[in-house]
Image (cartoon, rainbow, N blue to C red):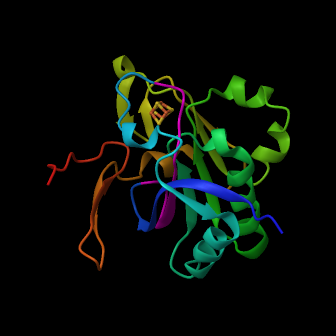
Amino acid sequence: MLRARIRLHSFLPHSRANGPGVRAVVWVQGCSLGCPGCFNPETHDVFGGEDVVVDELVDRIVGLSDTIEGVTVTGGEPLEQRWAVQGILVGIRERTGLSSIVMSGFTWTEIRRLPDAASLLEPIDVLIAGRFQTAGRIAIGMRGSANKTIHLLSDRYTYDDLASVVTSEIVLDVDGRITATGIDPVRLLAD
Ligand code: SF4
């Protein structure tokens, strides 16, 4: 039987800078939107990252559910692999009470025009939408630039909850890997 797969850039099991509370973060690999000044150009190549079975990623997140409040899916562009992203979010919702945030470069209008918009949005608590625009950079409240729009699709979170999310963090894992993340990440020097 064929199993749904996703092209994954990276995964962080515990983050405090990608949404309210402690959250797992899924960075999807691949983005064709080409925003000038993008902070994550290494996520653009659709052949980069690694190929992951959706069910195995869901199992991994479910296994963290006692230690996290939710999952944030970002990228790269999550909606360029939206069937896989939807599979992840539905799988998590069926098995846990975790919340879900999706950060997309597509605008709200573009997303609403997708033929599967209703089912895509159904398992999402918060959607942050719109291209990153360097000229409008704000890097607060989970928005990289002022044009980005926030859509509270359930009553799980408020605008104040999002505004209180820290903008930057550095995570050191047990293998010594350092990850700098958040809407205003620290730039680490290359090796
Ligand atoms: S949508 Fe996101 S990942 Fe894609 S180019 Fe724009 S800022 Fe970069």
Residue 41 screen position, x and y as percent: 38, 36
State which region is magenta: 18-34
80 on left or right of 35: right
The quadrant of the rendering that contains the N terminus is bottom right
Residue 128 screen position, x and y as percent: 57, 38
* Residue 33 versus residue 101 in the image, above or below: above
Q: Is residue 176 shown to the viewer in this render?
A: yes
Q: Is residue 157 shown to the viewer in this render?
A: no
Q: Tell me the residue at 46%/67% (across/down).
A: 22
* Camera-side residue of 160 and 128: 128
* Camera-side residue of 13 and 9: 9
Residue 96 is covered by the magenta coloring: no
Main SS of the magenta part reads loop
The quadrant of the rendering that contains the C terminus is bottom left
123 on left or right of 141: right
Q: Tell me the residue at 64%/62% (across/down).
A: 99
130 on left or right of 56: left
Q: Furthest residue to the top?
A: 135
Residue 87 screen position, x and y as percent: 74, 58
Q: Tell me the residue at 84%/39% (across/down).
A: 116
Q: Quadrant of residue 129?
A: top right
Residue 22 is covered by the magenta coloring: yes
Q: Tell me the residue at 68%/52% (across/down).
A: 85
Residue 104 screen position, x and y as percent: 57, 38
* Camera-side residue of 52 and 25: 52
Q: In which quarter of the image is residue 71?
A: bottom right
